[in-house]
Image (tube, rainbow, N blue to C red):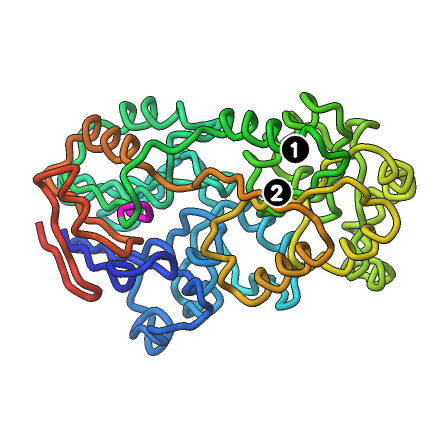
Amino acid sequence: MKVKILKGTNQIGGVFTEISSKEAKIIIDFGDDLDGVKRLENIEGLTIGEPAYDGVFITHNHQDHMGRIDDILDGVPVYMSDLSRKIFETVFCFSKNKGKIHRKTINLEEGKTVTIKDMKITPYIVDHSAYNSFMILIEAEGKRILHTGDFRNHGYKGVLLESTLKKIGKIDLLITEGTTLSREQVKSKTETELVDDIVEKTKKYDQVLMLMSTTNIDRVTTMQRVANRTGKTVIHDIVLSNVLQLVTQKIPNALNSKDVGVYLPGSVYIKRDKEEYKKYIEPFQERINETGKLLHGKFIMNIRVSMLKDVERLKDKVLDNCCVVYSMWEGYQKEEIYKKFLDRMMELNIDIYNLHVSGHADYTAFNQVIEIAKPNAVIPMHTENKEKIKDFTDKAVILEDMETYTF
């Protein structure tokens, strides 16, 4: 068996891994760099030339893991969850850049093995800030490789990690994300603890705006729990309202609860008559009409940086005792669009609180995987400090991009 990290041994995001056996060769993830620059433009047999790979497997629908799948040659099959694809396309229909996936994909289902020549590939659900994320088990030549994708154990599904690892059993090689290896070794707060923090900071405000990822369903649950404890109405923007219809009916939403509102941002309102948006707007039209009244009361609402003009309008009309909860990776604040948004909030005298828990593994999660899976070798990737994995295991294999590990 051979493993080559084509990109990702020295960076977070924009990662992809090549795994090959005697008969088969696959790629796991094919994403954009976080800064949007494609540093490794083309790969022979994957994006140019004659197809030389038997499949590409996508662990989850974050742009830095699947953003380049349209670059893949038509002759190379791409496997990803149909649900993950629908979530991605729903969210990015409303984005400035659009994000529709044009190439065909094959549905990847939890626990169902895909057999390609002498290789078996099985996805398992794992806790992450993207709904329906997978870690992937690859079996061939009597060897077992576990690629973690992005994972954690401190979200609402964090308890699944132990049982999933025990189900998988001992492995020969662990390929693990190492996003937090460059950070101080501390235990992450749980989503439940985050609820406590947000309640404490925001209980004195009448309106709370949550700047958060629309695909972070754990954070939507957290938002609902904060609302329950502080006596506020929940309002979802039109994008999140649609995403929730895809993923779960356990969280109150505008179509299963009269207590949840729907906000239609101005940027969407002006396009409401376009055919591509009607299917997203029309099911919620009644709740959109009724939400105007809710905006005059106490509420908590998810927002995105693209809603800056909406916040400005609301500040003129209804936001009289308001704060923003920034609940995302703090690194985004260096980007111009986030900096502009947060600077404007300060100009509007809207208080800002950074309250977030990571979507990535902390040291307890690394220990958990290594102790249960008992790998003979561990390769770190998706990290800016790969050497730190040696703090957790004496089985570390440190690779550079494009370097092959054979076992």
Place of residue 174 in the rendered image (x, y in percent of width and height, measured from the top left): 20, 42
Place of residue 295 in the rendered image (x, y in percent of width and height, measured from the top left): 85, 40
Q: Which residues are magenta?
A: 177-181
Q: Mark 2 sits on what residue? A: 325
Disc 1 is placed on an element classified as helix
- Taking the image as shown, residue 139 lies to the left or right of residue 263, namely left
Count up the numbered dots: 2
Query: Which corner quadrant of the image does residue 145 belong to?
Result: top left
Viewer-nearest residue: 64 or 102: 64
Q: Is residue 165 visible?
A: yes
Residue displayed at 86% across by 43% down: 288
Disc 2 is placed on an element classified as strand
Q: Mark 1 sits on what residue? A: 202
Place of residue 147 in the rendered image (x, y in percent of width and height, measured from the top left): 28, 44
Place of residue 379 in the rendered image (x, y in percent of width and height, measured from the top left): 18, 48
| Circle 1 residues within 10 Å: few <14, some 14–19, many ≥20 | many
- Taking the image as shown, residue 83 lies to the left or right of residue 275, namely left
Q: Is residue 10 above or below residue 230?
A: below
Residue displayed at 29% across by 53% down: 383
Check if mark 2's residue and mark 1's residue have beta carbons within 8 Å. yes
Q: Is residue 251 visible?
A: no
Identify residue type, mark 2: Val
| Circle 2 residues within 10 Å: few <14, some 14–19, many ≥20 | many
Q: Earlier in the sequence, mark 2 or mark 1?
A: 1
Q: Is residue 307 above or below residue 214?
A: below
Asked if the magenta segment contains residue 237, the reply would be no
Query: Which corner quadrant of the image does residue 20 belong to?
Result: bottom left
Asked if the magenta segment contains residue 179, the reply would be yes
Identify residue type, mark 1: Thr
- Taking the image as shown, residue 25 lies to the left or right of residue 128, namely left
Magenta span: predominant SS is: helix
